[in-house]
Amino acid sequence: MTAVPILKIEDLRTYFHSRSKQAFIRSVDGVSLEVMKGQTLGVVGESGSGKSVTALSVLGLVSAGPGVISGKIGLRSDRIQKDLLEGLGEFVKLTTKDGKIMEVSKDVAGWRRGAERIMSKVRGKEIAMTFQNPGSSLNPFTPVGKQITEAIRLHTSTKTEREAKERALSWLHRVKIDSPRLRFDHYPYGLSGGMCQRIMIAMALASEPSLLITDEPTTGLDATIQSKIVDLLEELKSELGITTMLISHDISIISQLSDSVAVMYGGTVFEYGPTKEVLSKRGNSKHPYTSALLASIPSAQNIREKRYLQAIEGDVLDTINIPTGCRFYSRCSRMTERIRERCVGHEPDLRETGSRHKVRCWLYFD
Amino acid sequence: MPKTILEVMDLKKHFTDRKGLFHSLGERHPSIPAVDGVSFYIKENETVGLVGESGCGKTTVGRTILRLEKPTSGKILFDGKDITSIPTDELRRLRGQMQMIFQDLDAALNPKMRIRDILSEAITVHHKIDGAEAGKRISDLLEQVSLKKSKLSNFPHELSGGEKRRVGVARVLSVGAKFIVADEPTSALDVSIQAQIVNLLRDLQKRLGLSYLFISHDLPVVELISHKVAVMYLGKIVEIGLSDRIASRAMHPYTHILWSSLVEKQNKENPQKAKSVQADRWGVFDFERPVSGCRFAPRCPVYESSGRPAICIDPSTEPQLEDIGGSHQVACHFPL
C-alpha cells in the first residue's frame, strides 16, 4: 500500500502538574502514531489512558501547565507540510534522571505565541475535531445552523453569507438531519444527543479539513442511535474519503470503522497495527492487555453459557506513579518467571512483531 | 419452587409540572406518563433485566418500586405484602430488605464523609448494634466486595470509579437487603472494571441469594446477568421473557431493532443479515405527544411495511402484553 501519512506524531509527551501531589501526571508519555491518507486510525483505551489528551495536543488545545513538552507532530496535507511543534522546543527545558523527565521549565507565554502562529492556519481548517459530549461543546446561545455557517465563512473560500448558508444546509442534509431548514434555526438544547453529534460532524467537515479527529462520537448515546452514527461515519468515509482519527473506548466501534488501531494504556501505545490483527480474538502476537480487554467484553459465547467474565484485576494505572518497568505488569496475567525481572525493572519498547504490527511487551522479545 | 419476592401490578407514575406562582394564569401543562402501566414479578434469587432507551422510564420504575417516588396508581407487593401506600415508618423498616444501587455514585456518596462513616451509618440506621460490632460487619463487607481495608479512611473523591461502585454495593449489603434495584451499575466504567463489577454482582447473588432488578441499557451485560429481560418503550413494557429468547427470538419489532443494532456492531462481516428489520426514520420520541394506539407505531418498520394498518393507531386498541408460551409475553398486533 502506498498510503502517505497525513499526520505523523512522534514521541509526543504531554504532562500536567498536580499541585496537591507535587508530581507530574504523565498523561501522554511518548506516543508515536501515524494517520494514513484516506484511512481511519482508531485509538482505543480505557479512561485516563491519554487518548483525548493526545488529540488535544495535536490541535494545541492543552491549556493546563506544563502541557505539551516534547515531540513532533508532522502534518502533511495538500496545503501545509510542517511540524506543528516546530521551533517550540526552545521554550522548554527538561531535566532528566535515569531517562525519566523529572523537571520541566516551560516559557508558557512564548510557547503559546509560537504555537498559535502555527495553529491558526491549521486548527479547524486542516484538522477539525468533534469533541466528547456534543451537547456542551456547541454554543448554547447560537442556532446550530449559524454555527456551521460561521465555520464555513471562517475556513473556506465561500464569501457571501447566503452562499455559506446554502452550504451549511447541504451539510445538514449530508449528515442526515431530517428537515434541515427547520433545524437550521434550532438551538442545541432543543436537539437530541444524536442530532448534536451530527451537527458537530457537519460543522467539522464543513471547513473541508484534511484530517478529522472525532473524540468518543458514540459515547452517551443509546444503542440504536449509536449504530446510526456509526453508519453515518462509515458512509462519509467511503463517499468523501475523509482521513479520520477515531478515539473511543468502545472496541466494537473501533473495529468496525478503523483500518489500523492503536491500543493505549497509561499514556503510551501498547499495541499498534492493522485492526484485523490487533482486535481479532485469535492471533498470537498480542499484548496481554489487548487480549484481556477483548476477553472482558461479554461475547456471544460468554452470554450463551452464562460464564463469568474475565476481568482484569486491579485498577487502571494512574499516571502519576508510573512503575519503572512495564506499566501493566501489576495486572498482567501472562508474566512468566522467565521474564519477570525485566517486566518489573525495564519498560519494553514498542517493537515490530509482524508486518506493521507492533507490540510493547517483553513476551515477544528474548 | 422459589417464591415471588416482588410483584408489580399495573404500576403508573405520572409526573406533573410543579405548580408555580402563576400556575393558574398559564396554560395547563400535560402530565408526563413516565411509567404507564407496568406489571412484572421477580422471584427469589432471580435477576430481571430492564432495558430500553434513555428516557423510557427504566429508572422511574426502579425508584417507584422502592417507594422513592409515590406511585400514581397500581400495586406493589413486596414479599407478599402490599407496600403501595404503607406509612413512612413502616416503609423505613422494609428498606432494610430492599435497597438501590444508584446510577451516579458521585452524587450518591456523601463527599464529606469517609467510606467508613458512610458504611457504618447505613448499618446503624437499620440495625441496633454498637460501634465495635458495626466495625466487624464492615470488615466482613469489604471482604465480600473485595475492597482494600486502607480505603476505609478515604473520601469518595479519592476512589476510582470501580471502587465507588464497590462501596455502593457494600452499602446496600450492609443493611442486609435481599432485593436490590441496580440502576446502571456498570455505566461509566471501563470494560475491564465493568467485568469485575458484573462478576461481583453474580457472585453475591449466588452466595447470599439476592434478587436483582438490573436496569441498564448495555444489552450484552443485561443478557449475561439476567434470567429474564423486560424491554420498555415509552413507559410500558413491550416484551418480557427469558433472556436468551429475548435476545435471539425477539417478537416485538422494537426489541428486534434494539438487539440487531447490537449484532450489527458485533459482526461487521455480514451486516445484511442483521438488517432484516431496520427502521429508516429513527425520529425522536416525544413524551408529551398524546399516544393513540401502539406507542411504537410512529417508528415501527412493521407498521410501515404492512401498509399502516389502522389497528396500530386506533386509540381503543393499544396492544397489551399477551402470553405466547414459554413465559414469553409480547405487546404487539403483528409480532414477528
Image (cartoon, grey):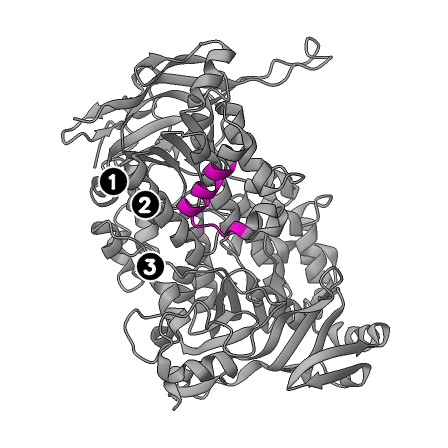
Q: Which residues are magenta?
A: B135-149
As drawn, the label of residue A310 is 3
Q: Is residue B226 left or right of residue A326?
A: left
Tell me whether circle 2 and circle 1 mark residues in contact (CB < 8 Å).
no
Q: Secondary structure at mark 1?
A: helix
Q: Do marks 3 and 2 both belong to one polypeptide chain?
A: no
Q: Nearer the viewer, mark 3 or mark 2?
A: 2
Q: Do marks 3 and 1 both belong to one polypeptide chain?
A: no
Q: Which chain's residue wears label 1? A: B
Indicate the amino acid at tag 3: Gln
Q: Is residue A283 left or right of residue A344?
A: left
The single residue placed furthest to the left in the displayed view is: B325
Indicate the amino acid at tag 1: Ser
Q: Does residue B223 sit above or below A89 in this rendering?
A: above
Q: Which chain's residue wears label 2? A: B
Q: Do marks 2 and 1 both belong to one polypeptide chain?
A: yes
- What residue lies at 66% left-to-right and 55% top-to-bottom? A148
Q: CA distance from mark 3 to mark 1?
A: 21 Å
> How far across and how far down the image is residue A345, in percent?
51, 82
> How far across and how far down the image is residue A224, in percent?
40, 46
Residue assigned mark 1: B243
Residue assigned mark 2: B203
Q: Is residue B315 left or right of residue B141?
A: left
- What residue lies at 25% left-to-right and 49% top-to-bottom? B276
User: Which of B231/A350 is in front?
Assistant: A350
> In the picture, which quadrant includes the N terminus of chain A?
bottom left
Crowd tier of the residue under label 1, counting other residues whose Cα lies within 10 Å: few below 14, some 14–19, many 20 or above: many
